[in-house]
Image (cartoon, rainbow, N blue to C red):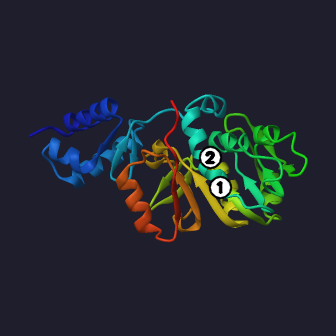
Amino acid sequence: MQLAEERRQSIIDAVEREGRVLAAELAQRLDTSEDTIRRDLRDLDAAGLLRRVHGGAVRRTREASFGERVERDLARKAALAHSLRECIRPGDTVLIDAGSTNLALARLLEDGQAATIITNSPQVALALGDFRRTRIVLLGGTYHAAMGAVLGAWTLAELQQLRADLCIVGLCALDAKRGLAASDAEEATIKAAMVAGSTRRAAAVLNERLVDGAPFAFGRLAELDHLVLEADAPEDSIASLRQAHPGLDLRIAAKART
């Protein structure tokens, strides 16, 4: 019989080697119960050695800064942005949350596609800076370079006075049961206010956001009206999202150009 220390080291090695592991598969591989594996994953997560997610665990990585994310996966984000753009209706007042995928969306928008665009991202505002028919509003607050967003009490107060037709919210993680999550508590508060102050809500997520375990939940899956996933999104994730929210307008983006 494997000692607890040996079993946990085997789990750590599997996560580092494979990136993502499932509790059920680990239980079979290590000849133990799923309850034991779940306790091990909980303890290893608390120790900072992996990130526990629904059904298993993923490799714990440093959250990339906004500047780093902007330069990554450009084709994948552009594919998501093309589908996300279709959620905007003529005459809409649109809240666009900070984020690299949402910045890709902003770069695709045409002047006049919405009546007003409000954002907490200076980069999004600058991308739309030449618009004349669409009014661009940048929210106030304290700028956080790592997130590419203005946050804080001032931002929250302004959001609470707004009513948007559509909110395009950035997600650090999405889970059918746990819902929408962010990696920072202050950021989660702003995202929750955006969702609460909008008639319709939309988001687009890369595949890795479906397995990441961001710690700060800010909304339920049922609060989303539109969701865009990648062309190669895992079938089990698509099925679980559709089962949890049958009324969700779930769109699959075109395959990213390489």
Residue 150: percent from left, percent from top: 77, 44
**How much space separates mark 1 and mark 2, taking CA atoms?**
7 Å
Considering every residue shown, the one lying at the far right of the view is 132
Residue 157: percent from left, percent from top: 81, 59
Q: Is residue 184 visible?
A: no
Amino acid, disc 1? Glu
240 sits to left or right of 95? left
Residue at coordinates 40% horizontally, 39% vertically from top-left? 47
Q: Residues within 10 Å of mark 2 (few under 14, many from 20)?
A: some
Quarter of the rendering containing residue 121: top right
Seen from the viewer's position, the closer of residues 57 and 82 is: 82
Residue at coordinates 46% horizontally, 48% vertically from top-left? 213
Quarter of the rendering containing residue 69: top right
Residue 57: percent from left, percent from top: 35, 44
Work out which quarter of the rendered image holds the N terminus and state it.
Answer: top left
Considering every residue shown, the one lying at the far bottom of the view is 247
**Secondary structure type for disc 1:** loop
Amino acid, disc 2? His
Disc 2 target residue? 82
Seen from the viewer's position, the closer of residues 249 and 212 is: 249
Residue at coordinates 79% horizontally, 64% vertically from top-left? 160
**Secondary structure type for disc 2:** helix
Give the number of marks.
2
Residue at coordinates 84% horizontally, 58% vertically from top-left? 115
Disc 1 target residue? 86
Residue 68: percent from left, percent from top: 61, 28
Q: Is residue 230 visible?
A: yes
Contact, mark 1 vs mark 2 (Cβ under 8 Å): yes
123 sits to left or right of 40? right
Seen from the viewer's position, the closer of residues 238 and 47 is: 238
Seen from the viewer's position, the closer of residues 57 and 162 is: 162
